[in-house]
Amino acid sequence: MNDFQTDPCGLPSTARTPLPTAAPRPPFHLRRLLPFVALVLFLRITVGILLNYPDYFPPNFDSDFLLGRQPYFFGSYHWAFYAHLISGPVTLILGLILISNRFRERWPKWHRMLGRIQCLFILLVLTPSGLWMAQYVDLGPVPAAGFSVLALLTGLSAAMGWRSAVQRRFVSHRWWMSRCFVLLCSAIVLRLVAGFASLIRYEQEWIYVSSAWTSWLIPLALYELFQWKQSMKG
Ligand code: HEM
C-alpha cells in the first residue's frame, strides 16, 4: 500500500472513498451504541482512577495501593510515582482526543500540537516512570516483566508514530498511534478486570499477575488481527 499521502488532515485519500462491502454490517443503532458504551466505560474508569488521588496527595500508607510501600516510597520511587500519576490520565485523555477522526479533520493544527505533547509525555514521563515503578511491583518478576515490556512497547509505538507523521507516512502513523492508544488502554482493562474480580469476590493473586500481561497482550492481538483483516480486504 502506498504510505505517502499529503492530505492536510493526515487522512489517506483512499480512506475517503467508500469501499464495496460484501459482508452485511451490524444494524446502525448497534454501530452507534457500542462505541458509546465503550466511551462511557472508559470515562467511568478514568474518573474512578482519579478518585483515588486524595489517598496519594499526601500519601496515605493505609490505602490499598500504598500499603507496605512506606520503606522505599520517599526514595526515587515517589518521583516516578507522582510523574506517573500526572502523565497516566493526561496521556489517556489526549489519546482519546487524538484518535478521533472528527477532531483531526476539524482541528488539524490542534491535532498536531496535542500529538507532540502526547509523544513527549509518553516518551519522557510515562514510559520511564512505568519502567521504574515496575521494579517495585509486588508478586514477583512476572508482573514486573509484563509492565516493563508494556512500558517499552508504548514508548516504541509513540516514537514510531511520531517519526512516521514527520515523514508524512500517514497510514503508518495511524497504525502506530492506534497501537499506542491500545497499549495505554491497558490501564483501563487492568482496572476493569480487577473491578470484575472484586464484584464476583474472586480477588486472586494470579489474576493480578496475569493481568500485567493479558491487559495489553489481548487487546493488542485483537487490534493486529483487525488490521490484518482490513489489509486483506484492501
Ligand atoms: C506505558 C503504560 C503504563 C505502564 C507500563 C504502567 C505501569 C505501572 C506500574 C508498574 C504501576 C505500579 C503497579 C504496582 O506496583 O502494583 C502503575 C501504577 C499506576 N498507574 Fe500505570 N502504567 C501505564 C499506564 C498508565 C496509564 C495510561 C494510566 C492512566 C490513568 C496509569 C495510571 C496509574 C496509576 C493511577 C497507578 C497507581 C495505582 C493506582 O492508583 O491504581 N498508568 N502503573
Image: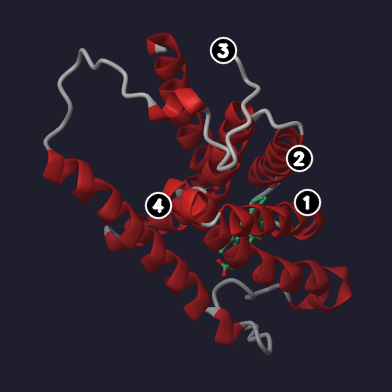
**Residue pointed to by mark 3:** 1
Q: Is residue 65 above or below residue 139?
A: below
Q: Amino acid at mark 2?
A: Ala
Tell me if label 2 and label 4 are in contact, CB under 8 Å: no
Mark closer to the chain start, 3 or 1: 3
Q: Where does residue 225 sit, x and y in percent of width and height?
A: 44, 21
Task: Name the image quarter holding residue 200.
Answer: bottom left
- Labelled pair 2, 1 in contact (Cβ < 8 Å): yes
**According to the image, label 4 marks what residue?**
193
The location of residue 193, given as percent across then percent down, is: 40, 52
Task: Determine the CA span between mark 2 and mark 1.
Answer: 7 Å
Horizontal relation, residue 32 to residue 77: left or right: left
Query: Spatial distance from mark 2 to mark 4, Cα to Cα?
Result: 29 Å
Look at mark 2 in the image and give the residue it sits on: 159
How far is mark 1 from mark 4, CA to CA? 27 Å
Of the image marks 2 and 1, the number of the one nearer the N terminus:
1
60 relative position to 38: left or right: right
Query: Disc 3 versus disc 2: distance between alpha carbons?
Result: 22 Å
Q: Is residue 170 above or below residue 136?
A: above
Q: Nearer the viewer, mark 2 or mark 4?
A: 2
Circle 3/circle 2 CB separation < 8 Å: no
- Amino acid type, mark 4: Val
Alpha carbons under labels 3 and 1: distance apart:
29 Å
**Near-viewer residue (84 or 75):** 84
Query: Image check: 164 left or right of 198?
Result: right
